[in-house]
Image: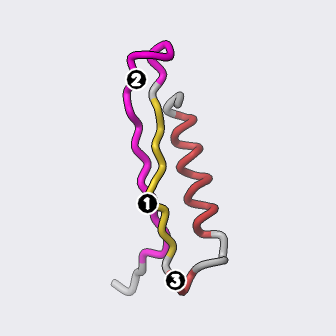
Amino acid sequence: MGQQLIATCTLVIIPNPTRAGMPNALIENVITHPGQRNAGHGKAILTKAVELACAANC
């Protein structure tokens, strides 16, 4: 206990039969706790989501 979620986003990898079978990535619902904003958490979570999308060949 004593843990608090401070930032989150949704990353969806979507199979795509076009574009040589390369999937699409959709990033949405990016949220940072109001008390933790402007501390780089949103940027960090988006950077990780983009890394994961690239690793999935999106």
Residue under label 1, please give it: 29
**Circle 3: element type:** helix
Q: Amino acid at mark 2?
A: Asn
Of the numbered discs in the image, which one, if any, rests on residue 58?
none
In depth, the one of 29 and 44 nearer the eye is: 29
Number of dots carrying numbers: 3
17 shown above or below 45: above
The residue under the point 42% across, 75% down is 5
Q: Position of residue 6 (x, y in %)?
A: 48, 75
The residue under the point 47% across, 32% down is 24
**Circle 2: element type:** loop
Please report contact status of discs 1 and 3: CB closer than 8 Å, yes or no: no
Earlier along the polypeptide chain: callout 3 or callout 2? 2
Of the numbered discs in the image, which one, if any, rests on residue 16?
2
> What residue range appears in magenta?
5-22
Q: Is residue 19 magenta?
A: yes
Q: Amino acid at mark 1?
A: Asn
39 shown above or below 12: below
Q: Position of residue 19 (x, y in %)?
A: 50, 16
**Circle 1: element type:** strand
Report whether 58 appears left or right of 14.
right
The residue under the point 37% across, 27% down is 15
Quarter of the image with the N terminus in it: bottom left
Q: Position of residue 31 (x, y in %)?
A: 48, 68
Report whether 40 appears left or right of 48.
right
Q: Amino acid at mark 3?
A: Pro
The residue under the point 49% across, 62% down is 30
Is disc 3 surrounded by few (<14), some (14 to 19) or many (20+) residues within 10 Å? few
Residue under label 3, please give it: 34
Q: Position of residue 4 (x, y in %)?
A: 42, 80
In depth, the one of 28 and 46 nearer the eye is: 28
